[in-house]
Image: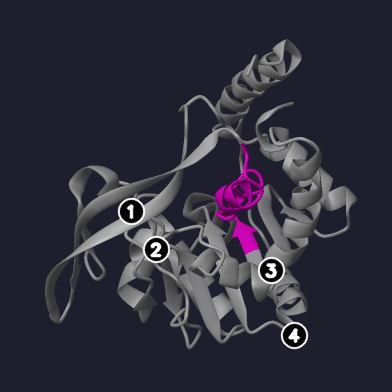
Amino acid sequence: MRSDPLRTTSWAANLIKHQVLKQRNQRRSVSAVSERTFEEILRTHASGENQVFLHVGLSDIKNAFDTNPYEFLLSKVEANFESVLAPGFTDYFKMSGVYHKEHSRPKHGMFSKLFLRDAEYRTDDAIKSILVDGPYRFEECVHDDSYHPDGCFAKLVDDDVLVMDVGVPWITCSHLHYFEHEFDVPYMTDRTYEGVQCGPESACEPISQTCGQYVSKYYSWNKPKIQRELAEAGVLDAYDLNGLQVLFFTLGDVEDVIGDKLRDDPYYLVTL
């Protein structure tokens, strides 16, 4: 199939824009934030919700509250939710072939690395595991195929789980890859990786893990566009607390909005 020159231009321009914004956001600043204001916002969005999925930038939280940012945030969310979830992604399994549920450190973000020690539960997905502190579980889900219709990511969407982004410069949503897979975008394909899984009280066992993967590394989400689209649809609440960004949205809402866009344009997430 011949490529669309306009789409190719839009995709390339988005990639450049993404790199420029990354550099700009490295220079952003955060000043002191009222703890009471933060708690009130958190309580408002926790009402009626039992679990929350976190994406966290600890540096901005440290600057906002001048305290241990990990302990501060975890205490606040655990006071408002029965279960706290975070990504425990170990993409390096593709190369190492070893996944240890207790000791394989999450690749992305210091919060997840620290949360590994406090989490009570971790999914069996050797590439896209999810960490949980609290009673929420994925026992009936498919774990060896990351974006399976009956998988862990699908369950979170079906349960319309609340996502909280805090201390990150723009929307962060671990599920965007899942939605790309769900709506069959042409720049993603499934690959299966072989290796072993080890547990704290069990021997290592052979496993295979299937996960969606981009056909090229030169794809990047247009996060400002995505955030703007969700806000205009009325499904995203955003707060700027003296530079500390706090966002709330539910995965069912994101699926509804982004799904419509991907049906119309399968390259929607990665173009201007």
Task: Give the residue at x 62% y 39%.
Answer: 185
Give percent across and percent down for residue 15. 60, 23
- The residue under label 3 is 38
Q: Is residue 217 shown in magenta?
A: no
Could you tell which of marks 1 and 2 lies nearer the N-terminus? 1
Relative image position of residue 187 (x, y in whole percent): 56, 33
- In this rendering, is residue 145 above or below 24? below
Quadrant location, the C terminus: top right
Q: Secondary structure at mark 3?
A: helix
Q: Earlier in the sequence, mark 2 or mark 3?
A: 3
- Between the residue at mark 4 and the residue at mark 3, the CA separation in whole angstroms equals 18 Å
Give residue 210's position: percent from left, percent from top. Answer: 38, 53
Q: Which residues are magenta?
A: 164-185
Give the secondary structure at mark 2: loop
- Specify the quadrant of the image occupied by residue 239: bottom right
What amino acid is labelled 4 in the image? Answer: Gly
Residue at 60% from the left image edge and 34% from the top image edge? 186
Q: Which mark is residue 90?
A: 1
Q: Is residue 144 visible?
A: yes
Separation of disc 1 and disc 2 at Cα?
7 Å
Q: Which residue is mark 2?
A: 129
Marks 3/1: CA distance?
31 Å
Of all residues, the one furthest to the top in this rendering is 5
Q: In the image as oriented, which residue stretches furthest toward the front? A: 1
Q: CA distance from mark 4 to mark 1?
A: 32 Å
Q: Amino acid at mark 1?
A: Thr
Q: Position of residue 252 (x, y in %)?
A: 73, 66
Q: Which mark is first along the chain, 1 or 3?
A: 3
Identify the mark at residue 174; answer none if there is no mark.
none
Which residue does the numbered mark 4 point to in the structure image? 48
